[in-house]
Image (spheres, rainbow, N blue to C red):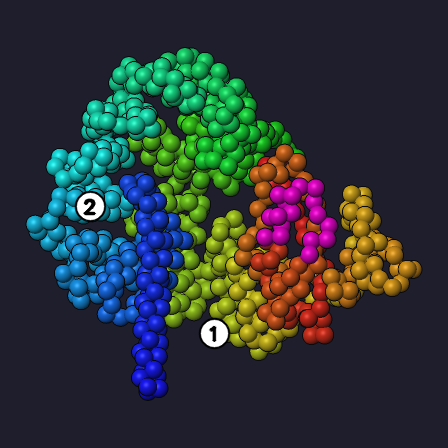
Amino acid sequence: MNKSISKNYILFSLLLLLFFSGCVYYNTFYNAKKAFQEAEDVREQNKYTSGRGNAQKYNIAIEKCLKVIENYPNTKYYDDALFVLAVSYFHTDKFSKADFRFRELLANYPESEYTVQARVYLAKAKLELLENEEAMTLFEEIFVSDVDKEVKAEAAMGLGRFYYDNKNYEDAQPYFMSIRDSLGTDFEKRIAQRYIADGYFDIFKFDDALSAYLQLLGMDIDTKEKYHALYNASQCAFALMKIAEGMDYLNKLMNDEIYYDSLGALKLAVAEGLERENDIDGAQDIYLELTEDDNKRIAGTSFYRLGLIAQFDKDSLALAKEYYDQAVTFIRGTDIGKDALMRSSDIGKIDIYAQKLVIDSTTSQEAIDEAAFAQFQLSQLYWFNLNKPDTAILEMEYLIDSFPTAYDVPNAKIALSQMVRDYYGDTTAADSILQAILVEHPRSDKVPQVLDVLGLKGTEADTGYAERYVRKAEDFLIDDENVDSAKYYYQHVVDNYPESNYYLHSRFALLWIMDEYEPPGDSTLYYAYTAFVDSFPGNEWATQINQILRESGTKRTNYVEYDSTYDDSADLTEDELALLYADSIDVAQDINNSDESSSYLDPVEKLAIAPDGSRCTKLPIDPIEIKRPFVYPDAAYSDGWEGFLYFQILLDFSGEVTDYVLKIKSPNEAINREAEETMKTMKFDLFRIPTELQESWFYYKFQVMKPSSLR
């Protein structure tokens, strides 16, 4: 009796365990299916737009399905779980995992109800994985198989959208057309037609696009699709110079009160249409009206368009600048706003570059060169940025006539020749300008460029300029190892071409030849190297010399003295002193919070106190390398500030700046930011710094000079 009761108890327990185990299994899959369906419902609403579902719900489905697959293999809902898992992977962009699970489903459950859908999804996953050959094979099998039209439509839409999303519009069109013409439902046909129209529009086939949009308007579309079709149809008509037709499409939208909120954008399009019709005054009137629009984008775009009209149609750069500045206040961060800012800045540069120099007997050559360069920039500004070729040519001719001795005259003549060639199409006149360079500036570094354009390289005319002698020297040195001949030609450049860019190149080469082939055996070469660096700092040849000195172990600490007391106070302006006074109390308290008597520091001492409270040492040497040279920012042109900034810096074992603090700033933030960007790319010669100071903080005096054109 007791044994019978015991057996019954065990049997009941096992049944109970199986029951609850089955409940857990079913509940797990039920929750997965529920989350999956909620995600699919969202995706279905966005099916032919973003195509995205609820990622969070898909992830819940993935988590639950994995539990079913891992804990309950070969059960009733296993293939269901596989399909839900694979689709969830696909719609969360885990295409490799989706591919694996779809193939598992097709291999192990060929009779599953999900087989057909799995094949379509597998083909789309192969596309995303760029396995195009396998994908196309799968799609071909679907298209020729005896499956429902709905399945073929989904496959065609998948292929079409893949090509469309990758901007391969022409390959996408046949698939969209197959949906529109036979495979799709009315809804799918409408979506396919929009893809067809937008695809033509994006590749500028405006005639085909217009026809496609008109065909879309003949379908049962909603108000949003109607707006899109009519608006884009108007743009196609404008592009085809069918202005009246384009206006009709826009008027249909403007006369429909449903689109009242879009009235500003529609008027903007009407104004652009008037511009295309060359009704500039009519367009201008609409733009002026729209500058009062509550929508900042509409108002800002209208100011921008007014600026373009003032610049190109009314020939009023001052008025154009006013409009561009207004546009920037509304739409600064947009592409149009950035273009407006650039155009305003370009027009503003005219006043900077247009300052004329009156030359007399006291005018230095340096001043002439600076004035000529500013004039060159002015001409380039008119040519490239302001689209005023006539003015650009006149300004370049003024440079050549007014500053005949300037360094940039050959460059100006080359630019003028190209302008004449491009604008007037006068090849004879252009070549004549270039030929004059060969006669009037035979030693210019620009001669090789002129010879190349005239087709005279390698002829008898191909001589007399510095580059040619440098190339001869290199040929003798490298190919023939003829040191004496190489030295001869390098020395010829040094003696005869002091204005050439090859002058320093040749001076360095002579020193390098001495170092490599004729070492003097005493300190002569060392002093020659250091004299070069001190005379011509901050160029690539000086950098190479410093590298040579470092590699040879040569130290140059005898060239500088290091002092931990601040001795530049005379250079500080009243504003800089005020800056130091302003927070000297805070600095002192940071150094020693417990010492009340230290609550004030003399401002000129502040620079000598490092961020960690240690003593700074003045760094009196220039950097040997600057990876990002300081460029005077355009935003500071209006201030025209120049002077000294003061940094506290820390160097690493190689001499590079690893930390810095800008202690005395300029009043212009753009200058401060540019200086900081330069400071952190500087590298100093550690051989010129005593070993005991190499890991300490230094303070460094950074000079900011405004461009010569602003002087």
Image coordinates of residue 201 in percent, x first then y, are 26, 32
Query: Which three-letter amino acid code belongs to the residue tagged 1?
Result: Tyr
Residue closest to the far front? 1
Is residue 93 among what the camera can see?
A: no
Q: Is residue 568 magenta?
A: no
Residues in magenta?
Answer: 661-677
Query: Foreground: 596 or 521?
Result: 596
Residue drawn at (25%, 62%) of the image: 77
Q: Is residue 390 left or right of residue 676?
A: left
Query: Toward the viewer: 451 or 596?
Result: 596
Q: CA distance from mark 2 to mark 1?
A: 77 Å
Q: Position of residue 466 (x, y in %)?
A: 44, 52
- Which residue is denoted by mark 1 in the rendering? 517
In the picture, the quarter occupied by the N terminus is bottom left
Q: Residue at image x 45%, y 13%?
A: 285
x 32%, y 69%: residue = 19
Q: Earlier in the sequence, mark 2 or mark 1?
A: 2
Which element carries disc 2, helix, strand or loop? helix
- For label 2, the residue is 154
Percent x, y of residue 597: 92, 60
Q: Helix or strand or loop: what does disc 1 sit on?
A: helix
Q: Amino acid at mark 2?
A: Glu
Give how far across and how far down residue 559 sits, in percent: 70, 66
In the rendered view, tell whether residue 532 sits above or below residue 369. below
Where, quadrant-wise, is the C terminus in this rendering? top right
Residue count near mark 2 (Cα–Cα under 10 Å), binned few <14, some 14–19, many ≥20: some
- Tell me where residue 101 sits by quadrant: bottom left
